[in-house]
Amino acid sequence: MIIYLTSLIIITGCAINNKPAPKSNPNLPKVINFKAYPDRNAMALKWNVVKNISGYYIQRYNFKTKKWQMIKSIKDPFKSLYVDTNLKPATFYKYRIATFDKNGIPSLAIVTSQTTLPTISQVIPLEIKPLDKGMVKIIFRPHQNERVKGYIIQKFNDKIAKWENIANLTPRYNVEYIDKNLKDGKTYKYRIIAYSFDGLKSLPSNILKVLTYPKPPIVQDVKASHNLPKKIQLTWKKVKNAKYYKIYEKELFGFKPIAKTTSTFFIDKVNKDGAKKYYKVTAVSIHDTESLLDNSPEVLGESLPIPAKPLVSTNILNNKIELILSSPDNRAVKYLIIKGTQKYITKSNVFTDTNIQHKKTYQYKIYAIDKYGLISNPIEVKVSY
């Protein structure tokens, strides 16, 4: 659209040294055939070259201030094109142009207007899904516009309530993104923005929401044995859909994993008698998410300690010494008696020594042995015959 102004127009922005801008001279040659050709973020202004002038003034109308603003003073009268840049897509713009003479006096102005082209269309998401522990995958349709250079992936930050850029994907057919190191069982929001080679951006895509795989329930009813030799057995209740379980042992500054099992029990071979250890158990899902460590106190397990020392009383009879043996913890199934270099094993509670002589003192070391073969510390007995 071209509008020829017949009234005098003051070309603002033409003033020199703060002097008022000169009024239009209606006798100067005017521009003809002034047209605007839109792009998405620019406007090409074209006109026919005017003879016998010194140049052109180009102004753009500011709809906020309702005033014309000078955007270009062209001092080459043979120019017939100017491109106004850094414009907004899908926005209406109005321009006017006037010639000026050697004294900077403008002609009557001619007005044209046009709307910039629409911005790049939105990206169309296709799928978002959790992949594995702390991972989600986003797939979207390649943009149909060949001017698209790439895509900005944004994720919503709940703490500051703001969208943040997390990835920049190029070229146009790179339409897959995997986000990692996410928290288990949390909802995340994403959106995608396409951008062109000349810096134009599309509106954000529809928001994509995804819930990462949750943690399994806390393992319940963990129990540890106290009566097994040189080992501790743990048992617990089954967790639905658990792929396996992790066993943790307490150390000085927390817990460390020591084993994995697909069963609901575990045997820790400690190879020590009376060893005490503290445990916790977690479940790991088929997606490799792991349950929390139970906040309740850790479970104490203990390998079976050695039997208690036997109790011994003695009888001195004709030509023999009797040792009467008993087990304070009732664990002894037999006893080991050592006299000098001689060793005797008895399952009886009475040991009779007939290999003795008058006026001699005999020393015995006596051990209790339980059904697992664990041997107590010795008790020493001296008998004078």
Image: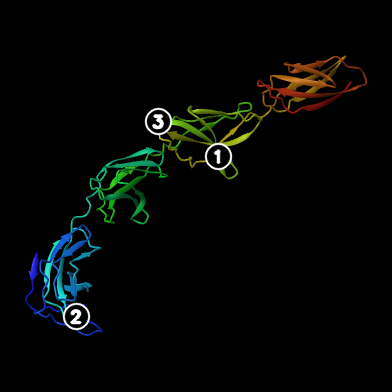
Please name whichever residue, 167 or 217, is drawn nearer the observer in this view of the structure. 167
Q: Position of residue 333 (x, y in %)?
A: 69, 19
Q: Please report whichever mark, 3 or 1, sits nearer to the chain's N-terminal start.
A: 3
**Which residue, as the protein is rendered here, is positioned at the far right?**
359
Q: In front of the other: label 3 or label 2?
A: 2
Secondary structure type for disc 3: loop
Return the residue at label 3.
241
Which disc number belongs to residue 256?
Answer: 1
Q: Are marks 2 and 1 in contact (CB under 8 Å)?
A: no
- Look at 72% across and 23% down and name the residue there: 368
- Location of the C terminus by quadrant is top right
Q: Check the image and tell me how it is coloured.
A: rainbow
Q: Please report whichever mark, 3 or 2, sits nearer to the chain's N-terminal start.
A: 2
- Look at 17% across and 79% down and name the residue there: 101
Query: Tag 3: Cα neighbours inside 10 Å, few (<14), some, or many (≥20)?
Result: few
Q: What residue type is labelled 1?
A: Lys
Q: Position of residue 194 (x, y in %)?
A: 28, 50
Please name whichever residue, 272 or 71, is drawn nearer the observer in this view of the structure. 71
- Location of the N terminus by quadrant is bottom left
Query: In this rendering, would 342 be left or right of 95?
Result: right
Query: In this rendering, would 380 be left or right of 371?
Result: right
Q: In front of the other: label 2 or label 1?
A: 2
Please name whichever residue, 179 or 168, is drawn nearer the observer in this view of the structure. 168
Query: In this rendering, would 226 be left or right of 95?
Result: right
> What is the spatial separation of the Cα atoms under label 2 and label 1, in whole angstroms?
88 Å
Q: Do the residues labelled 3 and 1 touch (CB within 8 Å)?
A: no
Query: Which corner quadrant of the image does residue 187 belong to?
Result: top left
Return the residue at label 2.
102
Query: Tag 1: Cα neighbours inside 10 Å, few (<14), some, or many (≥20)?
Result: some
Q: Which amino acid does label 3 sit on?
A: Asn
